[in-house]
Image (cartoon, helix red, strand yellow):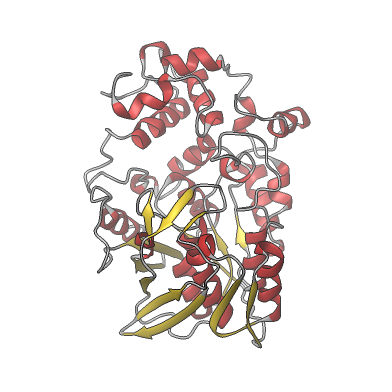
Amino acid sequence: MRVRWTRDDEVWRLVFLLDAEDETTGSCTDGQPIELRTNSCHVRTGAGGASPHPDLLAVAAWTVVAPWTRRRVTFDRPISPGLAEALRTGWGVDAGPVGADPRTGARLAISYSGGADSMAVAAMFPEAPFVHFQRVSHPRVPNRWTHYRSEVLAQLVHRAGRETHLVQSDLEFVLSRPRPGFPEHHAVTVGTLLLADDLGLGGVALGYEIGSRWLGSDRYVNRYTPDNPMWAADGRWGRLYAAAGVPLVLPVGGVSEPVTMRLALGSDLAHLVRWCLRGDMSGPCQKCGKCLRKELILAAVEGRPLKTTLTADSVPARPWQQPPPYAGQETIEYGCARVPGIEATPFAKAADHLGATVESTRWMDRCYPPAIDETPEPWRERVGAYMRANVGLMTSAQQRQVETWAAV
């Protein structure tokens, strides 16, 4: 793979050319098969991010091209030896040219989506700037997902009243299947990487919670996975970001979605929380599968019946009419065990299959201590103190429930 970045008019443009051994079909780190549609994309950073360190440009490019690269990646400017080694040990690729000095930084930024998980991180780090990544159209690839309202999410983020940096990109259209999306989940940080030197960043915080970090295997429905290659601090992506001087930080990586929802609703930004990708400025659409799932969490947290017009026969409810496993199954168990009248909702069959109880899901009200331990050192004490004060830590028995977790 040969990678080239150019910049003009406050826009970075990435063009990549496949080597003979590279392929147009591949898979991202979590196993999702994806196909390549086009070999270029752009990232608008505005006046900022005019001259990032070569390692930052290299990692940003790698989040886009990794699924299709097989033996080597050649960047358009020298990278540091440490970054080349992280690519060699993590992916088995030869990376170069090599010759840059490593970079460092001190500040933490939040890759902020406006959802409950990233809002929970914002509640923990009120001084951290937001970097919001907005999808925009690609000039050569038709948009087959027109219902995605990225402009609504961007407006809500701007209303947060925090230091906010909006980055726009069409990189999600590099994919042709299954739909526009990130080639690697980490591509959401491309804007943060390009702005890292301007902002003096030494870390990027994301809102991935316990289901993504510790229970993430086989598209998040399989088993306890401490060595999760996507988000483990010592996994290949963790080592890569650390080599570029911006280690990945998962402040809520030890807590469940019900906890991040509770923290978000208790924050000063609660009126701006938005998980729906289809709704307008008046609110979520309340008709999609994501809205239905988040309503289950919200109802469980608030201890009330489900509020939805969707029925078990509706298309968004179909996944929960089948036997498990379910994506994010631990959260479905939590909601089914707590929502009054669950037997009269679209989750009735799932509740019957799972047989979850308040006691069997109580571990999801606490923080998993190893998640604190793997937080990079500059922020570890802050995360630990916050979790102890606002959430509480799991008992040893509850930790064992996490470590023996397997969706069935």
Q: Residue at x 41, y 19 (%)?
A: 321
Q: Position of residue 97 (x, y in %)?
A: 62, 84
Q: Residue at x 38, y 62 (%)?
A: 174
In the figure, is residue 308 to the left or right of 24?
A: left
In the figure, is residue 205 to the left or right of 393?
A: left
Q: Residue at x 30, y 19 (%)?
A: 313
**Image quadrant in which you'd find residue 58:** bottom right
Compare residues 6 and 11 and report the one nearer the observer: 6
**Image quadrant in which you'd find residue 248:** bottom right
Is residue 127 something that shows in the picture?
no
Q: Position of residue 44 (x, y in %)?
A: 35, 74
In the figure, is residue 33 to the left or right of 247?
A: left
Q: Position of residue 13 (x, y in %)?
A: 38, 78
Q: Position of residue 288 (x, y in %)?
A: 30, 35
Q: Residue at x 49, y 37 (%)?
A: 262
Is residue 215 something that shows in the picture?
yes
| Above/below status of 26 relative to 358 | below
Compare residues 54 and 97 and report the one nearer the observer: 97
Furthest toward the front, the residue is 20
Compare residues 128 and 336 and report the one nearer the observer: 336
For the C terminus, the image quarter is top right
Give the total number of marks visible in the rendering. 0
